[in-house]
Amino acid sequence: MPLPAALRRAKIPAAVREVLVRLGSAGHRSWVVGGAVRDLLLRRPREANDFDVATPATPKEVGALFRKVVPTGIDHGTVTVVLHGEGIEVTTFRGEGAYADGRRPDSVTFHTDLEADLARRDFTMNAIAWDPLAGELRDPFGGRDDMMAEIVRAVGDPSERFGEDGLRPLRALRFAAQLGYALHPRTRAAIRGALDVVRKVSVERIADELSRLVVAPHAPEALAIARSTGLLEVVLSAMAALPPATLAHAAEVLRRAPPIAEARFAALLHPVGPEEAERILVGLRLPRRLCGEVAALLRGHACRRGGAAGLPGDPAAVRRWLSRVGPERAPVLLGLAEAEAATLPAARRKPALAEVRRLASAVRDVLQGGSPLRTDDLPLDGRAVMRVLGAGPGPHVGEALRHLLDRALEDPSMDAAALERELGAWWARRG
Ligand code: ATP
Ligand code: MG
């Protein structure tokens, strides 16, 4: 078939081209496959290390052709060729045996035939191969037509394909969320029957797909499908248990929240509160830092469902709020507050959004003014405290610093001398 204009114009990274040329010269005609072809067809450029190459060469043959080759998934025929500082995944054509456990094929058979390799891939848009050297495209399952129609469609029989690997239903929703596509009716209908297989998938693989889903532009639509097909119950049961209106609200806040994982998870999970949200994310074995950050954002989330009532008002309250939530979290929290305000009914939306904008400008003023927000920002440190008090180290030092910070948050004009006087008075009161 004639090469689509998007691919005729696509820039193929030099390292990827070199991998293809070298494999081809050794008699192994190789292809760019998977996400890179899909994204280039959509005119979305990809980095070299995000290209997948499929080849009839065995991993051993690939290894012999390049100086640096890392056996990243050698059992599945994948090696990473490192060239010009880029890592390119090269996978031997394969077909797959049965998946008795619904997670991993029991056996992998290597093939010399490209079509067999494309047939084992998940969705038609991911089963397109491109040989940029010859300018040829292979699209045996109509992936391009489905992309034109904006449809995610399983390759072959969707129930069978989901039965082989329970991650695929979630991947279908993740791609739908990223691309704004609909699921083909039969692909969608096959999800419910695959839920028992989804339950067998490792929590890490599920969490990886979920993390990509929530930051995607069409995540709310995908979550709605997850709910109506029963998939949400399996992957985020606490969310599936919420009243539909609550979940719909959370999804609308998510849609408008900054597209980073911590903000999106905070938006999605805000109805259950910080502790439960953290418990859910830890259960998914997401990075601890992310789990803790989501909980911290929810504790600082100033805007309640009713409107902007919870937002700090006077300057001292803004400083106390910033100090409590951590100034580095302010931009994300403001983004969440704005997202929450934007979901309000028209009459309350305007004043709530104005409140958030007022807080944003007050935050900017505080941050520019350089008033102390952490004990580290005070003009006195622990050593100075001990010197002024004539006391040794101990818990009283931290207590003193926290007290001084409280005072400085009320009155940021206090200088070192004023704080020393305050410290003396505090020490005397404390006895
Ligand atoms: P992206 O990298 O943008 O997330 P991708 O399509 O490259 O998307 P990967 O997970 O990197 O997705 O997988 C690369 C390719 O491998 C896919 O395009 C698909 O052809 C195939 N593939 C990945 N996971 C599966 C799976 N669970 N079942 C079948 N084929 C899969
Ligand atoms: Mg990829």
Image: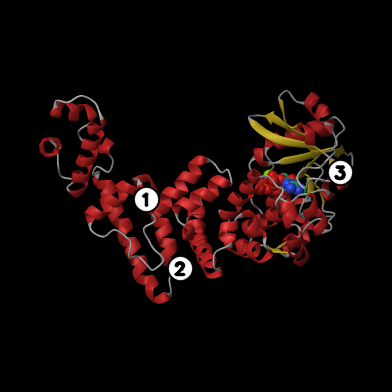
The crowding category of the residue bearing disc 2, from other C-alpha atoms within 10 Å (few below 14, some 14 to 19, many at least 20), is some
Disc 3: which residue? 97
Q: Position of residue 377 (x, y in %)?
A: 26, 37
Disc 2: which residue? 343
Q: Nearer the viewer, mark 2 or mark 3?
A: 3
Q: Secondary structure at mark 2?
A: loop
* Residue at image location 42% in from the left, 56% down from the top: 335
Cβ atoms under marks 1 and 2 closer than 8 Å:
no
Q: Quadrant of residue 20?
A: top right
| Residue type highlighted by circle 1 | Ala
* Whether residue 380 is visible: yes
Q: Choose the circle earlier in sequence order: 2 or 3.
A: 3
Q: Position of residue 129 (x, y in %)?
A: 79, 47
Classify residue 174 as left or right of residue 366. right
Q: Position of residue 274 (x, y in %)?
A: 45, 52
Disc 1: which residue? 330
* Residue at image location 11% in from the left, 35% down from the top: 424
Q: Secondary structure at mark 3?
A: loop
Q: CA distance from mark 3 to mark 1?
A: 51 Å
Classify residue 180 as left or right of residue 422. right
Q: Residue 157 bears which disc, if any?
A: none
Q: Quadrant of residue 191?
A: bottom right
Colouring mode (rainbow / by chain / secondary structure / one colour) = secondary structure
